Image: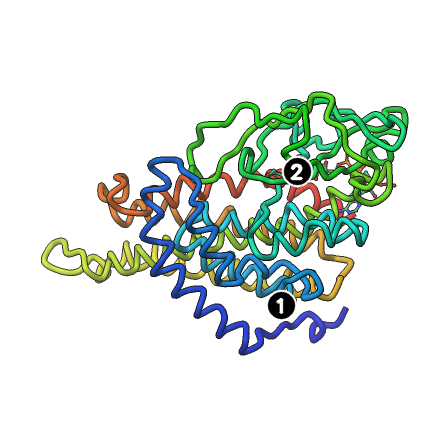
Amino acid sequence: MSALADLYTVPPEHVELRDTIRQIARERIAPRAAEIDREASYPHDLRALLGEQDILGLPFEPEYGGTGTGTLMLNIAVEEIAKADASTALILMIQDLGTLPIRLHGSEELRRRFLPRCATGELSPAFALSEAEAGSDAGGLQTTATRDGDEWVINGSKAWITNSGIADFYCVFAVTDRSAGHAHGITAFEVEADRPGFSVGKLEHKLGIRASPTGSPVFDNVRVPQANVIGEVGQGFKVAMSTLDRSRLGVAAQALGIAQGATDYAVAYARERRAFGQPINSFQGIQFKLADMETKCAAGRELLYQACCRADREDPELGKYSAMAKLFCSDTAMEVTVEAVQVLGGYGYVNDYPVERMMRDAKITQIYEGTNEIQRLVVARSLR
Ligand code: CAA
């Protein structure tokens, strides 16, 4: 591909919408961030706000009630929200992740049944792939689905599932033919949370993104109709992998938002805070930290935007680029937030200031939707 074809542009309407979302995040979301983190409470009010403002419509095409504005605009929005609060950004990210399997592989009937109500925020999904013994090794699932006439019977439990207890339906990956191996023996199902045999299970107490519940849903002889199968029977592993190729862009955008939010806060603090008779941003030791933080954010944004545009034009190298963007932006988020805490000194370490929360929130971006070791593996495989 020529260098010219790799270029992207950000349309002016995206910039306008970004500015509106930035204002909403600053005025309505940021003031709630410390409280929902401290209380580990899911912000139903902020989800309603994102619904009212059509922000939850960003992942969806117009025929399913969405904005049809594409992957780049979606992730610009994720970044803006994550600057204010990473847990609230995850509400939008999960609207994308949890519905991608249907959007990419589902029947028209499944799309019509679920997508329009997700676009308004009435329904919220979950993506239930990982298990206690199958995280990075996503093919090692123990959950099973057995055919019984026109129905499937699902048994097992999942782990580390975002939106546990909040989601109205779960995209569940289960072994349907163990002899076929993971590439051809796993199937994806839509499971509504009100089906008999479903229970929310254990919820985790976490270091970060505390306002977003994470848990281990249980499926005990849960029956779903054949119509709830997503894509073809036996193709579930590919449904999961192709979903993650796109959803990892959301993690990259969330990480970038955390990093930029921490950088902006540290810059403003260093302008005001005085030591040895002058603002601390007059010291080169601080200036160089801030310069490195800003540079890493800018570099991450270029890679993310490039990857988003590849998603929008169905580029065959999308998987490699989304892995690189997730890897780079999440490592940046961790490095930058640690430095932001350092710039604030003792104030950085206490929860009267937001940067310690940002540092705690950053850590998960190196882990979920594929650890950064898995992202390196995906990139390295593309180089063979
Ligand atoms: N798109 C489509 N198909 C793909 C694919 C992709 N990106 N990657 C692989 N496949 C296909 C392969 O072509 C192969 O099919 P064939 O045999 O027909 O050719 C099949 O899938 C198996 O491929 P591999 O043998 O290469 O798979 P693997 O077992 O070596 O695993 C892996 C590859 C990259 C390590 C994968 O297991 C992986 O991505 N692991 C990480 C999982 C992950 O990200 N989990 C996060 C869960 S989401 C989450 O965090 C929860 C939340 O709520 C936030």
| Label 1 residue SS | loop
- For the residue marked with disc 2, what is the amino acid? Tyr
Please tell me in which quadrant of the rendered image residue 165 appears.
top right
| Label 2 residue SS | strand
Residue mark closest to the camera, 2 vs 1: 2
Of labels 2 and 1, earlier in sequence is 1
- For the residue marked with disc 1, what is the amino acid? Thr
Residue 156 % position (x, y) = 70, 22
Q: Which residue is mark 1?
A: 69
For the residue pair 175 and 334, the one nearer the viewer reads as 175
Q: Which residue is mark 2?
A: 170
Q: Quadrant of ligand 1?
A: top right
Going 68% across and 26% down the picture, which residue do you hit?
Answer: 196
| 183 to the left or right of 300 | right
Mark 2 packing: few (<14 Cα in 10 Å), some, or many (20+)? many
Residue 380 got which mark? none
For the residue pair 316 and 35, the one nearer the viewer reads as 35
